[in-house]
């Protein structure tokens, strides 16, 4: 986990990816930057795009191949930017569109690719589409609105629970209910509406035209819901994600969306870069699926290029269990000709040094796990600070916590 431990392996990965040309992403090391906590250039206490740009040379020296940036779009920040109010603008707390452009150009100048988040399952409740939907019931088809159950519609339309805790439905003043699989400030989009498809194709083109090299697709498994929105019939539904079939996640219909996006990415990839060589643009699925075989469907040759291997992240510190996860992961992705990805930490989980016991023991295990991860075939993702062996901050007072899962999940 130290710089000395990881830097030689990362430099090797970088040279391999460069040598492989169009397939750089198959063995890339990708460094995740959570923008608001990475580097603050103006002293306001919040990280920003200029701060990221100023520290790109550090990442280049580490030898990473690409940088993945978490959302920096206009947002009320109800969920750390994953509640987007404008997909084509930079939130002033992070800078402006020229800062995004400067960052992409600086990264390319250092030989780094840039991957940004796209959030297609839901918008912010401050998005113009949702504001119009609240004002006019005739304009609600871009979201999932339903009448309630019960004598006066006072009960939610079904028993679905929010991933963040509590019901997945909120009632509006005229009595209708809208679906939000995450926070109430994040209403789910209705991907049966053609306008939603058209809008996100336009959003992808906007950022591809600016020069980004790909997208990490947030909740890539969630855009399509089972017909009729059936009840699940049991509680604690968040604990079932990634282990059992659910009517709101990993529905077969999501794959046609990803095929359409792959065609768009391929169109851009066919256009040579300034040096006359191909510039592959990629898609990375944040997808939870009940099995490695289901996850592999997201990376078939005509779908996305990578999918996060969360089974590796959630594997306990046990050699036999890790061996099983690694063997099954490699077999599943090999069946569709895709690379396997490996990740130990990200912005949604406790850092693995802390998960592995904390203190000196946790650090030793984290170093060993990082060495294992970086030696496995495929592509590795590092979370910011992982090269320093950073632990999780666990002593924040409740009053300063902002995560909606903490508030809705009773701590």
Image (spheres, rainbow, N blue to C red):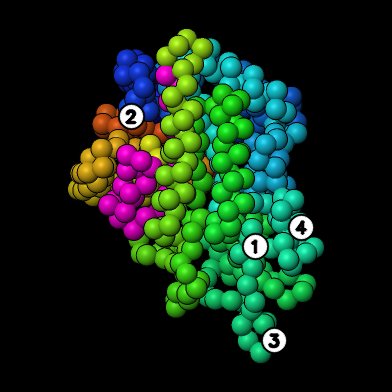
Name the residue beneath numbered marker 4.
132
Mark closest to the chain's N terminus, 1 or 3: 1
Mark 2, residue position = 26
Residue 54, by quadrant, is top right
**Classed neighbour count for the residue bearing mark 3: other residues with Cα under 10 Å, few (<14), some (14–19), many (≥20):** few
The disc, 1 or 2, on the residue closer to the chain's N-terminal end is 2
Q: Residue at x 61, y 64 (%)?
A: 144
Mark 1 vs mark 3, foreground winner is 1
Query: Is residue 47 one of those drawn in magenta?
Result: no
Task: State how far apart marks 4 and 1 are (Cα).
Answer: 11 Å
Q: Which residues are magenta?
A: 278-303
Q: Is residue 1 visible?
A: yes
Give the structural element (helix, strand or loop) at label 3: loop
Q: Nearer the viewer, mark 4 or mark 2?
A: 4
Looking at the image, tell me whether mark 4 or mark 2 is earlier in sequence order. 2
- Indicate left or right for 137 with 378 as reference: right
- The percent coordinates of residue 399 (x first, y second) are 70, 53
Eyeballing the image, is 55 above or below 361? above
Q: Nearer the viewer, residue 151 or 227?
A: 227
In what element is the residue under mark 4?
helix
Q: Which residue is mark 1?
A: 141
The percent position of residue 25, horizontal first and vertical second, equals 37, 28
Which marked residue is nearer to the observer: mark 3 or mark 4? 4
């Amino acid at each position: 986990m130290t710089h000395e431990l990881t830097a030689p392996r990362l430099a090797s990965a970088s040279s391999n990816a460069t040598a492989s040309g169009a397939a750089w992403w198959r063995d890339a090391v990708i460094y995740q930057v959570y923008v608001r906590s990475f580097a603050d250039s103006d002293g306001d206490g919040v990280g920003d795009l200029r701060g990221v740009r100023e520290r790109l040379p550090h990442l280049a020296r580490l030898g990473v191949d690409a940088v993945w940036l978490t959302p920096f779009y206009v947002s009320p920040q109800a969920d750390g930017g994953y509640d987007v109010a404008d997909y084509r603008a930079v939130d002033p707390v992070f800078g402006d569109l020229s800062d995004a452009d400067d960052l992409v150009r600086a990264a390319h100048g250092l030989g780094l690719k840039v991957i940004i988040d796209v959030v297609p399952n839901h918008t912010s409740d401050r998005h113009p589409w949702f504001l119009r939907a609240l004002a006019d019931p005739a304009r609600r088809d871009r979201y999932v609105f339903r009448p309630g159950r019960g004598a006066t519609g006072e009960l939610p339309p079904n028993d679905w629970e929010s991933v963040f805790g509590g019901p997945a439905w909120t009632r509006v003043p005229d009595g209708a209910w809208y679906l939000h699989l995450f926070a109430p400030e994040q209403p789910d989009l209705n991907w049966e509406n053609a306008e939603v498809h058209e809008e996100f194709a336009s959003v992808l083109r906007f950022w591809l035209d600016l020069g980004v090299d790909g997208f990490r697709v947030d909740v890539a498994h969630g855009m399509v819901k089972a017909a009729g929105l059936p009840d699940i019939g049991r509680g604690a539904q968040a604990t079932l994600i990634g282990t059992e079939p659910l009517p709101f996640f990993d529905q077969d219909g999501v794959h046609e969306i990803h095929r359409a996006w792959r065609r768009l990415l391929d169109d851009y990839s066919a256009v040579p870069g300034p040096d006359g060589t191909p510039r592959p643009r990629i898609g990375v699925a944040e997808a939870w699926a009940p099995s490695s075989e289901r996850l592999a469907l997201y990376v078939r040759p005509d779908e996305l290029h990578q999918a996060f291997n969360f089974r590796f992240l959630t594997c306990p510190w046990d050699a036999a269990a890790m061996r099983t996860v690694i063997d099954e992961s490699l077999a599943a992705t090999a069946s569709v000709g895709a690379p396997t990805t490996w990740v130990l930490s990200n912005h949604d989980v406790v850092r693995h040094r802390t998960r592995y016991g904390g203190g000196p023991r946790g650090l030793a295990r984290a170093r060993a796990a990082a060495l294992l991860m970086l030696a496995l075939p495929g592509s590795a993702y590092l979370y910011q600070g992982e090269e320093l062996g950073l632990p999780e901050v666990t002593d924040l007072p409740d009053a300063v916590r902002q995560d909606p899962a903490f508030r809705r999940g009773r701590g």
